Image (tube, helix red, strand yellow):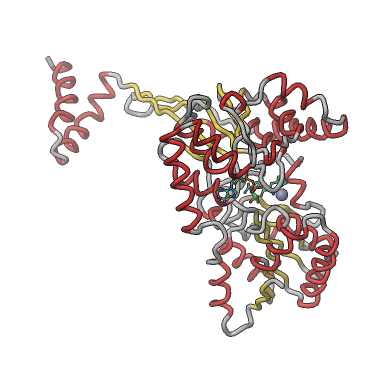
Amino acid sequence: MPVFLSTRDADFEDQFTALLGAKREDSPDVDHIVAEIIADVRARGDEALLEYTAKFDRMDLSADQLAFSEAEIDALIAQVPAEEREALELAAARIRAYHERQMPEDQRWIDESGAELGWRWTAVSAAGLYVPGGLASYPSSVLMNAIPAKVAGVKRLAITVPTPDGIANPLVLLAARLAGVDEVYRVGGAQAVAALAYGTDTIKPVDKITGPGNAFVAAAKRRVFGKVGIDMIAGPSEILVIADQDNNPDWIALDLLSQAEHDESAQSILITDSEAFARDVCASVEAYLETLERRAIAGASWRDFGAVILVDNLDQAAALSDRIAPEHLELCVADPDALSEKITHAGAIFLGAWTPEAIGDYVGGPNHVLPTARSARFSSGLSVMDFIKRTTLAKMTPAALRAIGPAAEVLAKSESLQSHGLSVTARLKSLND
Ligand SMILES: NC(=O)c1ccc[n+]([C@@H]2O[C@H](COP(=O)([O-])OP(=O)(O)OC[C@H]3O[C@@H](n4cnc5c(N)ncnc54)[C@H](O)[C@@H]3O)[C@@H](O)[C@H]2O)c1
Ligand SMILES: N[C@H](CO)Cc1c[nH]c[nH+]1
Ligand SMILES: [Zn+2]
């Protein structure tokens, strides 16, 4: 059973704080293992990569088998049934259309001093896209990573994806082909992140690593940040559903289970103002757990990290939601738009009972790579912005330098940085000569 809290409980604040602090992905053990793996891949390159792949994914490869060849990709793609290809193409088109709107414009203007100022956007040169593949396979994540990168103009796209026991999902390769990915490597976990960051003989280093993954992948991304850019910490999935009693308990139960089934470390939370509805949803979750193929994973997640919170009103629900800062927030209430106005911290919001979170996972259009573990307080879901960077531009004229240069001279003096000041003085002096 998940924990059941009520804001009326005398110790609610303590219980809620304990829920927020629940250790799901930030464990020192994981970080310790990951640090060793990264150091080993840095030191031994492909050799270490092959050993970890044998250990964790049970595959004995040679270095020249790390990358999927074009012929292997062609053969796998040929196996994809038409229905799956069409669904993937629909998803790709919708994701592309959504992300094309995100591309910002360059700016350039002349201010009152006569200085010309601005900025321009350019893409990172090479991006490494982590596609999870341990407990489930994620063709949709290929699209969610690669399409924004392509829209941004990234020249080289490399995917790493674990293929446990050597089993590759043909749809992952088709998604890579559809999205214009250049290289696909059959490696996963912290070792893949290390290879993308530091490079090996086979995998050339990239400038930015994006994509979701389990606790090992999330910890590895944290550790390589600085050597390369990363998007965010997109770890084990989460859903928070705020629902009133006018909902079908089965629908809400399935929404909670949809994220619980990703990982034993996933987290599903229901906030409602109706105790009877909460009990109905819990009963429905238990009933579905009897039948689901992934009941072991979903059941463990619901038991260990699931929660039901009873509130007096929806304002309370919104305030608690902001403290949780969930990856996914479903608002199944009479006026979801009004409630969403009261929410500040969430990776993605799904408005109304007709918008199951799973639509966002596949075909809605917005990105499904989203911040987890409360990091929606300070980061956003993956977007075109993650693959571009801004370079500022400044162009002075003699008149502009005359107008603003003296202030620079004063500030340089106050910082005791003589050459800074003199570089301005020399130019101003030449104007007066
Ligand atoms: N937040 C998001 O946007 C988002 C999107 C999709 C999926 N996800 C999450 O991604 C995760 C996918 O996890 P997964 O496990 O299916 O695939 P994964 O590819 O992330 O992890 C598999 C790899 O983990 C490594 N690993 C496993 N056990 C290990 C151990 N004991 N020591 C060292 N390394 C180990 C192995 O190298 C293995 O190849 C789930 O948690 C899911 O919820 C999140
Ligand atoms: N819900 C995941 C993000 O947390 C994304 C996903 C991919 N496939 C299914 N779900
Ligand atoms: Zn999902």
- Tell me the residue at 61%/31% (across/down): 61
Dividing the picture into quadrants, the one containing residue 116 is top left
Which residue is at the far front?
A: 60
Residue 212 appears in the rendering: yes
Counting from the top left corner in percent of width and height, residue 34 is at 48, 48
- Image height check: is 80 above or below 29? above
Dividing the picture into quadrants, the one containing residue 284 is bottom right
- Tell me the residue at 54%/77% (across/down): 14
Counting from the top left corner in percent of width and height, residue 415 is at 16, 40
Which residue is at the far bottom?
A: 10
- Tell me the residue at 42%/41% (across/down): 39
Which residue is at the far top?
A: 433
Which of 257 and 361 lies nearest the eye of the viewer? 257
Side of 103 relative to 122 (left or right): right
- Image height check: is 117 above or below 168? above
Side of 357 relative to 196 (left or right): right
Figure quadrant of the C terminus: top left
Figure quadrant of the N terminus: bottom right
